[in-house]
């Protein structure tokens, strides 16, 4: 068989039966089975012009964060009419029980939730921006469907993830085992491509070969197949060679990741789950791992009842964690090469409900951190009176933001990845 055509499909057709191993094989073997098998000596490489040193970090607010109480239009009467008890007071009108919005420089009548002070500091320093009124046509209010739409960049919520397709389009060979890392219990759809399946872990101590924990006799055979030169004795296209490469890739990823996150960070992070995730990302960036995309998440934003306390707590966690992460990157000298993007699957309805919360809505802000972004409020805040059946009308299609991230930051062909051409949102500072 011609080695150039020896793909995953051919490999599987030749009798690679991973289906029978699903319940017993280690997770990294199941994951690696999704990748393409390359001929011996085929090196992973990216297309010319792709900026290899740039990193994208994605933070997902799961549940549908209320954008109106995060980016607060305190200068509009309609906001207070629609939310008589849930609204954030205007600056100078707050109380101990209801703190006032934090005004933004140069933003007339718009501020931030008082608990989002950590992000406000980044805005004041010119290291962060907010894209207002982001959504898509014919919005879906289902958590799962809307999140899939955001993950696939497809209105039908079908196909591979937009970041997974980025790797498919920019890598001439199989993406390496560390091309994308998701911290959490499951791999997000956004990272899944035809050739790309991300490394996923929640606790780095568990991202390792655990066979020795089951029985000491399993440790020696595993280490033997990871020894240098182990592939020399077998056909490089055999199933045995594939398993050896799989084990070696997984071992290398595990060793690098665990060594990276074990180092003490350069700044103090808060003691929250999202801060722990971003601290691990900061450590891996500091270790100069080849990872291009990191993915973290913070859930709990589905605030149908008694929204005030839970949302404030979540925004405080997110803002403080993002602030510490940026300080860490700055101390590393990496703040200019790491772009952090924050999104949620939808916003909430304009009018509060009878339970002191908000129901599923449509348009919402996106948030970006990094020395390369245009600082401040970008785009127009949605109208609070010109509504679509009680919901905000979006001003910016989220795929135009993706197009900017892909084209202007990641150096990738957005039309090929997103399925059609979108006018790129003006997100970044002009190049020097």
Image: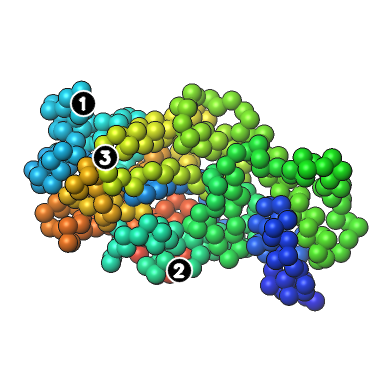
Quadrant of the drawing holding the C terminus:
top left
Q: Position of residue 119 (x, y in %)?
A: 34, 34
In the image: residue 381, left or right of residue 421: left
- Depth-wise, is mark 2 or mark 3 nearer the camera? 3
As measured in the structure, the alpha-carbon distance from the residue carrying label 2 to the one carrying label 1 is 45 Å
Of all residues, the one furthest to the front in this rendering is 355
In the image: residue 141, left or right of residue 45: left
Q: Which residue is mark 3?
A: 306
Check disc 2: other Cα within 10 Å, few if <14, some if 14-19, many if 20+.
Answer: few
Q: Which residue is mark 1?
A: 97
Q: Is any atom of residue 366 visible in this view?
A: no
Residue depicted at x 34% and y 57%: 398
Check disc 3: other Cα within 10 Å, few if <14, some if 14-19, many if 20+.
Answer: some
Q: Which residue is mark 2?
A: 158
Between residues 371 and 187, which one lies in front from this camera angle?
Answer: 187
Between residues 332 and 33, which one lies in front from this camera angle?
Answer: 33
As measured in the structure, the alpha-carbon distance from the residue carrying label 2 to the one carrying label 3 is 34 Å
In the image: residue 394, left or right of residue 257: left
Q: Position of residue 283 (x, y in %)?
A: 57, 34
Quadrant of the drawing holding the N terminus:
bottom right
| Disc on the earlier residue, 1 or 3 | 1
Helix, strand or loop at label 3? It is: loop
């Amino acid at each position: 068989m011609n080695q150039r055509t020896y793909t995953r499909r051919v490999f599987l057709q030749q009798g690679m039966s991973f289906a029978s191993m699903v319940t017993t094989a280690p997770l990294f073997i199941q994951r690696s089975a999704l990748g393409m098998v390359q001929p011996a000596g085929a090196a992973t490489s990216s297309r010319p012009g792709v900026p290899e040193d740039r990193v994208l970090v994605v933070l997902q607010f799961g549940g549908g964060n209320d954008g109106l109480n995060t980016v607060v239009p305190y200068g509009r009467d309609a906001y207070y009419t629609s939310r008589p008890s849930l609204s954030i007071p205007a600056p100078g009108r707050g109380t101990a029980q209801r703190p006032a919005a934090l005004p933004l420089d140069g933003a007339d009548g718009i501020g931030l939730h008082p608990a989002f002070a950590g992000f406000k500091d980044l805005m004041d320093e010119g290291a962060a921006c907010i894209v207002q009124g982001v959504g898509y046509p014919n919005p879906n209010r289902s958590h799962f469907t809307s999140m899939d739409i955001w993950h696939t960049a497809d209105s039908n919520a079908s196909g591979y993830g937009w970041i997974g397709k980025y790797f498919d389009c920019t890598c001439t060979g199989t993406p390496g085992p560390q091309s994308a890392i998701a911290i959490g219990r499951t791999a997000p759809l956004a990272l899944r491509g035809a050739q790309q399946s991300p490394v996923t872990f929640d606790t780095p101590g568990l991202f390792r070969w655990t066979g020795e924990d089951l029985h000491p006799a399993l440790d020696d055979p595993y280490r033997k197949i990871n020894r240098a030169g182990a592939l020399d004795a077998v056909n490089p296209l055999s199933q045995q060679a594939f398993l050896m490469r799989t084990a070696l890739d997984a071992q290398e990823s595990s060793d690098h990741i665990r060594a990276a996150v074990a180092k003490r960070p350069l700044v103090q992070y808060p003691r929250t789950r999202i801060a722990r995730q971003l601290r691990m990302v900061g450590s891996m960036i500091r270790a100069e791992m080849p990872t291009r995309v990191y993915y973290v998440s913070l859930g709990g934003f589905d605030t149908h009842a008694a929204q005030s306390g839970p949302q404030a707590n979540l925004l405080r966690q997110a803002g403080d964690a993002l602030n510490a992460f940026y300080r860490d990157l700055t101390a590393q000298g990496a703040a200019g090469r790491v772009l952090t993007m924050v999104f949620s699957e939808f916003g909430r309805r304009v009018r509060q409900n009878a339970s002191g919360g908000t129901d599923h809505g449509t348009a919402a802000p996106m948030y970006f951190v990094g020395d390369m972004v245009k600082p401040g409020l970008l785009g127009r805040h949605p109208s609070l009176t010109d509504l679509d059946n009680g919901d905000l009308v979006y001003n910016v299609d989220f795929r135009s933001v993706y197009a900017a991230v892909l084209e202007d930051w990641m150096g990738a062909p957005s039309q090929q990845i997103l399925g059609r051409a979108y006018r790129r949102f003006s997100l970044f500072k002009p190049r020097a």
